[in-house]
Image (cartoon, helix red, strand yellow):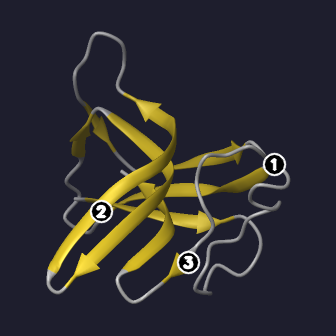
Amino acid sequence: MVHLSVSALRGNPGGRTYPYAGYLGLSKLTVEGVVRARVEDNKRLLPASSITISIRCYEARTRFTISKVNLLLDATQTLWSAAEGLEYEDLGSGDYPFRISLPSKVGGLSTMQHPDYRIFWRLEAG
């Protein structure tokens, strides 16, 4: 199998938040790093169509045990895709750098949390 991981180029990657530059809603916000694909010990490659990295803003409402999650903002960048004419191609080990910038007039909100409502941001690779 192939294992994907997201690493920061600078800053403190071991903290609770991913390093970024800029201020949400005031200036351009930039997130950069690298997505690493590593083949595990069994040496099996993964047939894949693409590798993408996304910054997403979610809104979650929880009432008793019922939870509803809405996607507020999605900024996605394709880092690798299968060759033209092929639906899938074997994915092996490799490093795929990324740099995603959100404009100053972004539609998402800042992170906040209340007992039954919260807004949060995620950096997702897939």
Residue designated by label 2 = 69
Relative image position of residue 39 (x, y in whole percent): 33, 59
Q: Give the amino acid at mark 3.
A: Met
Q: Give the amino acid at mark 2.
A: Val
Q: Which mark is residue 12?
A: none
Q: Nearer the viewer, mark 2 or mark 1?
A: 2
Relative image position of residue 76 (x, y in whole percent): 50, 40
Crowd around label 2: few <14 · some 14–19 · many ≥20 (10 Å): few
Q: Which mark is residue 28?
A: 1
In the displayed structure, does residue 69 sit left or right of residue 99? left
**Residue occupying the point 62% across, 87% down:** 15
Relative image position of residue 53 (x, y in whole percent): 49, 48
Q: Are marks 3 and 2 in contact (CB under 8 Å)?
A: no
Residue designated by label 3 = 112
In the displayed structure, does residue 45 sit left or right of residue 72? left
Quadrant of image for the N terminus: bottom left
